[in-house]
């Protein structure tokens, strides 16, 4: 018995050594980190610690994100897209309303259809108003959710937490992701990726236990992701890749030991290819619908094939694929834009094509033994297709933000490749820990510096020019022999955008000369750059050089005739030059290009108001208030139009609303007082006029209006003082001269009357108007009578009656005829009621 048992004991030990060897060679990273133990107690201990381990990993990932992105709460809005999306967007600043909900789904504003992104901005505004730090922190919040989801989804699919943690860690802090997280306008990246990861989560739940609800949940999350950013259109293809690995629902061959298998792949039953395709049919349908909508939405932003041919686009796509990999490995010279070179050198394109072909061949050829390589590589290639430039939108050659979701594919290759190498070569786990930690630390350090570049427009575009001007071939681009400008074919507008944006940032700080230098640099690149011409026009407009500013705007419109800002600003110049009728077509053109341009509606209304087209002006003011209900200037100007139409009660309501929004608007106080006086409410009129003078004590018109209100309230002494102050500020103020002369000549209080002074004031008013105004001549006649110059009073009164009769002013003529009888009797006229 003893002899027969010994061989079995020896055989058992041998078998154990073989199993241990196999496990060490082919097991995932967890096997390398597994603590030694035996029996059921070790298994139970591991089972209990898995939840704690995962929690610690998630907390560590969040700590990495905080370490990089904590400064963003102090970051500002950028002058590059943030204004269009948030800070100047009237729709966003109306918050979440039923009307805005419909608008978000209907609009193609800014050449995109992403209603969910619009709604997220509206919610942020409703919660935080225009607090840029809060908008930034929401981006970071979604990035943190995405990071945790990346870890959780890959751990669930593969059963290997440490490679999943590495992928999530690099995803959390890689410098290429800073653009998507630290730029408010790129909310669509983090938001769409959030729903993409939720789609994968729901799909994994469906695969684990096929039921209706997780399938439709995955479909719903996919639809929401497309409504945040349509770049996710390739996600159905990605699901097919995951079916192959790590889910194991479609296999080219029986699974081998090691990394080609995973817990999911071993427990999922392979499905026929047709079944997997039919299963994805609803996802592909959403992809087709989203692609159609996006193609229509981006019609105005697409670059025509005549300007950038298919060959050039293909060459740039090949180069971009290689450059993205390069910047993932070595994230140096990152910028907010990378200028499109037009045509890359043929040898560079050929090398890029060879590298991509070789990488693809290697990944596909080893798909049976190392499926993660094929899946990761095709993930990277496929998810970049919508933004790789075959359909060119905008001037950029590539963009860091486009790598937010595609980078996961490269990280899959790196993480599971490292595990595979570690297992095959029996590397010490310390080596793997050190390598992974070094990569994370390097990304962390670079990102901590790179994130600060995004703190404001000035730092962002100074950095952009510093890292792109030379590296992208700007200095070597050819010049036009006639104009001296660099050729647009060799140096597109992207570099000019940086100069313009940097100049705009400098201008906002009052650094006019520095700003102008950058605007001129943009014009040196492209002499017809509408953005640069518009910026120089804005600078000239601010300096009051209206004719020069108008010339810049009109030149810019030659190359960009539908540009709403150029049209609006050209109209503004013409209006300030007193050419309101010429300004109207420009305002109209601006509104045709941007139907929700509140400033254009406002200034069009002002031009129409100045031309006496009051009803048309009111229509435009109402349009402003639909977009910006709490916009004080629109209420004020609407009140002016209503006043001109004699609708004083309605006008008063608009002035009251204007003052609620702008309590320091002296003109609104004054105009409200006019309406109140028309209604006989002199007491309130006086109150508002005194407030107007408190705000602007040097305005002669306000003193005149207060004097008139005081006179109507029988406060003659105060009225005379206000007329005199108005004349001190404006000596040739005809109406003030006339009204003061009338009071000095006709007031019932003898202490007020002063015949000689009345004559002096009335004569001056008549001199200024050429003795052609009947009511002024009538005042002079009353002044002569008070000064006992009755012969002059009669002759002047007769002239006043004759002028009024000739002008068809029957009431004025009749009044002067009655006063003539008094003067002929040698008596002055005194009254109890003042004009």
Image (tube, rainbow, N blue to C red):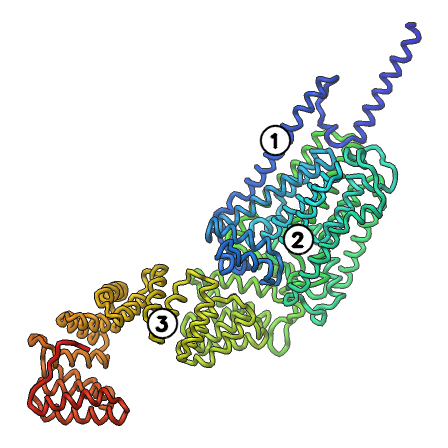
The residue that label 3 is drawn on is 640
From what the image shows, is residue 171 above or below residue 523?
above
Nearest to the observer: residue 471 or residue 378: 378
Report the front residue among 150 and 330. 150
Please report contact status of discs 3 and 2: CB closer than 8 Å, yes or no. no
Q: Give the spatial CA distance, label 3 vs label 2.
A: 47 Å
> Is residue 523 something one can see in this rendering?
no
- Say what secondary structure mark 2 lies in: helix
Which one is earlier in the sequence, the residue at label 1 or at label 3?
Answer: 1
Report, in whole angstroms, how far the alpha carbon at label 1 lies from the one at label 3: 65 Å
* Residue sitting at x 17%, y 78%: 740
Within 10 angstroms of label 2, few (less than 14), some, or many (20 or more) residues?
many
On the rendered structure, is 589 left or right of 654? right
Note whether 438 is above or below 466 in the view shown: above
335 left or right, relative to 750? right
Q: CA distance from mark 2 to mark 1?
A: 32 Å
Sequence-first tag of 2 and 1? 1
Q: Which quadrant of the rendered structure holds the N terminus?
A: top right
């Amino acid at each position: 018995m003893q002899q027969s048992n010994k061989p079995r004991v020896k055989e058992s030990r041998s078998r154990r050594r073989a199993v241990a060897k196999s496990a060490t060679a082919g097991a995932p990273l967890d096997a390398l980190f597994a603590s030694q133990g035996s029996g059921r107690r070790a298994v139970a201990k591991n089972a209990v610690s898995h939840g704690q381990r995962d929690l610690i990993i998630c907390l560590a990932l969040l700590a990495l994100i905080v370490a990089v992105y904590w400064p963003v709460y102090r970051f500002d809005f950028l002058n590059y897209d943030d204004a269009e999306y948030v800070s100047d967007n009237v729709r966003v600043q109306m918050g979440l309303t039923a009307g805005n909900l419909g608008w978000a789904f209907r609009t193609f504003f800014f050449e995109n259809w992403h209603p969910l992104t619009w709604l997220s901005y509206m919610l942020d505004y409703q919660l935080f108003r225009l607090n840029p730090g809060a908008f930034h922190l929401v981006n970071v919040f979604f990035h943190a959710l995405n990071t945790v989801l990346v870890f959780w989804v890959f751990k669930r699919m593969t059963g290997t937490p440490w490679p999943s943690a590495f992928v999530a860690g690099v995803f959390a802090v890689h410098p290429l992701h800073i653009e998507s997280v630290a730029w408010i306008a790129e909310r669509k990246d983090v938001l769409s990726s959030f729903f993409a990861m939720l789609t994968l989560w729901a799909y994994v739940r469906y695969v684990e236990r096929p039921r209706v609800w997780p399938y439709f949940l995955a479909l719903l999350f996919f639809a929401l992701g497309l409504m945040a950013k349509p770049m996710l259109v390739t996600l159905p293809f990605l699901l097919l890749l995951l079916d192959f690995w790590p889910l194991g629902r479609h296999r080219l061959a029986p699974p081998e030991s090691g990394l080609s298998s995973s817990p999911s792949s071993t427990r999922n039953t392979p499905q026929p290819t047709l079944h997997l395709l039919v299963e994805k049919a609803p996802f592909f349908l959403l992809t087709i619908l989203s692609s159609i909508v996006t193609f229509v939405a981006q019609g105005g932003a697409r670059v025509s094939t005549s300007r950038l041919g298919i060959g050039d686009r293909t060459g740039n796509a090949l180069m971009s694929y290689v450059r993205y990999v390069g910047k993932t490995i070595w994230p140096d010279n990152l910028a907010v834009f990378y200028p499109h070179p037009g045509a890359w050198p043929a040898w560079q394109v050929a090398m890029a094509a060879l590298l991509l072909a070789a990488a693809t061949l290697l990944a596909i050829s080893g798909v049976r033994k190392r499926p993660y390589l094929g899946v990761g590589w095709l993930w990277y290639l496929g998810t970049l297709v919508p933004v790789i430039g075959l359909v060119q939108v905008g001037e950029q050659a590539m963009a860091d933000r486009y790598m937010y979701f595609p980078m996961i594919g490269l990280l899959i290759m790196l993480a599971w490749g490292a595990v595979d190498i570690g297992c095959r070569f029996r590397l010490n786990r310390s080596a793997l820990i050190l390598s992974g930690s070094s990569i994370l630390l390097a990304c962390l350090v670079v990102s901590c510096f790179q994130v600060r570049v995004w703190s404001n427009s000035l730092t962002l575009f100074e950095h952009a020019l510093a890292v792109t001007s030379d590296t992208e071939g700007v200095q070597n681009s050819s010049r036009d022999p006639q104009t001296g400008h660099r050729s647009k074919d060799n140096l597109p507008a992207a570099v000019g955008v940086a100069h313009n944006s940097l100049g705009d940032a400098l201008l906002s700080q009052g650094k006019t000369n520095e700003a102008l230098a950058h605007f001129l640099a943009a014009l040196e690149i492209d002499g017809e750059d509408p953005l640069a011409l518009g910026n120089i026009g804005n600078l000239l407009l601010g300096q009051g050089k209206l004719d020069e500013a108008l010339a810049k705007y009109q030149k810019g419109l030659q190359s960009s005739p539908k540009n709403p800002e150029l049209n609006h600003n050209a109209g503004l110049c013409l209006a300030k030059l007193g050419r309101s009728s010429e300004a109207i077509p420009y305002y109209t053109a601006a509104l045709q290009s941007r139907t929700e341009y509140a400033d254009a509606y406002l200034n069009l209304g002002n031009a129409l108001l100045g031309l006496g087209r009051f009803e048309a002006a009111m229509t435009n003011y109402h349009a402003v208030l639909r977009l910006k209900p709490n916009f004080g200037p629109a209420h004020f100007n609407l009140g002016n139009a209503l006043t001109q139409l004699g609708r004083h009660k309605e006008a008063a309501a608009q002035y009251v609303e204007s003052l609620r929004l702008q309590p320091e608007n002296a003109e609104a106080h004054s105009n409200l007082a006019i309406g109140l006086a028309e209604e006989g409410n002199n007491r309130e009129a006086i109150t508002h006029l005194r407030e107007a003078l408190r705000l602007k004590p040097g305005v002669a018109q306000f003193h005149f209006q207060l004097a008139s209100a005081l006179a109507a309230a029988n406060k003659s002494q105060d009225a005379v003082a206000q007329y005199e102050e108005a004349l001190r500020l404006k000596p040739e103020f005809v109406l003030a001269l006339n009204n003061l002369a009338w009071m000095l000549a006709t007031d019932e209080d003898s202490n007020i009357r002063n015949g000689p002074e009345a004559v002096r004031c009335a004569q001056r008013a008549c001199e200024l108007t050429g003795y052609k105004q009947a009511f002024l001549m009538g005042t002079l006649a009353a002044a002569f009578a008070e000064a006992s110059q009755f012969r002059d009073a009669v002759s002047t009164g007769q002239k006043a009656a004759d002028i009024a009769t000739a002008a068809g002013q029957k009431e004025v003529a009749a009044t002067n005829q009655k006063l003539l009888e008094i003067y002929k009797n040698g008596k002055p006229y005194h009254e109890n009621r003042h004009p």
